[in-house]
Image (tube, rainbow, N blue to C red):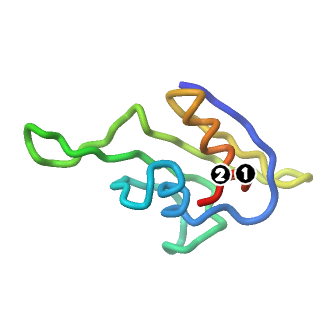
Amino acid sequence: MITQHINTSGPRPIVRDLAFGLWGNDANFDADGDASHPDDQHWNRLMLCLRRKDEESGFSRNDETQRIEITVQAAKSGNVISIHAPSEALADRVAQILLGEHSV
């Protein structure tokens, strides 16, 4: 598991926009966290995981190679965001979206 820390201020992306930015607009994903409503941009804890269809059973299952966990802690100079991901490439993509360097 890779952990990356970034500093940012302001609201975060809407959860579905973050997921769609990572995996495309038709992504099937699982989410858990402390967002108070679907369009909340002030969440502080988030887990996202891409879901893929299991060809054998026909059911969707979480793809743990595409699971991210994000925590936000307030700091004097903005927010310190910790990104936990199974690969550096996935953590980098999440960081780019959170920093506004990648459109969602």
Whole-number angstrom distance, CA of label 2 to CA of label 1: 6 Å
Element type at marker 2? helix
Relative to the observer, which residue lies in front, 32 or 96? 96
- Residue at (68% x, 33% y) in the render: 4
Q: What residue did someone put label 1 on?
A: 101
Give residue 8's position: percent from left, percent from top: 80, 52
Q: Are marks 2 and 1 in contact (CB under 8 Å)?
A: yes
Q: Is residue 23 left or right of residue 41?
A: left
Q: What amino acid type should be assigned to the residue bearing mark 1?
A: Glu
Q: What amino acid type should be assigned to the residue bearing mark 2?
A: Ile
Task: Mark 1: give few (<14), some (14-19) or many (20+) Cα within 10 Å.
Answer: few
Residue 97, label in figure: 2
Give residue 79's position: percent from left, percent from top: 79, 52
Task: Mark 2: give few (<14), some (14-19) or many (20+) Cα within 10 Å.
Answer: some
Give residue 104's position: percent from left, percent from top: 59, 60
Relative to the observer, which residue lies in front, 100 or 72? 100
Q: Is residue 57 above or below residue 103?
A: above
Q: Is residue 87 above or below residue 31?
A: above
Give residue 102's position: percent from left, percent from top: 66, 52
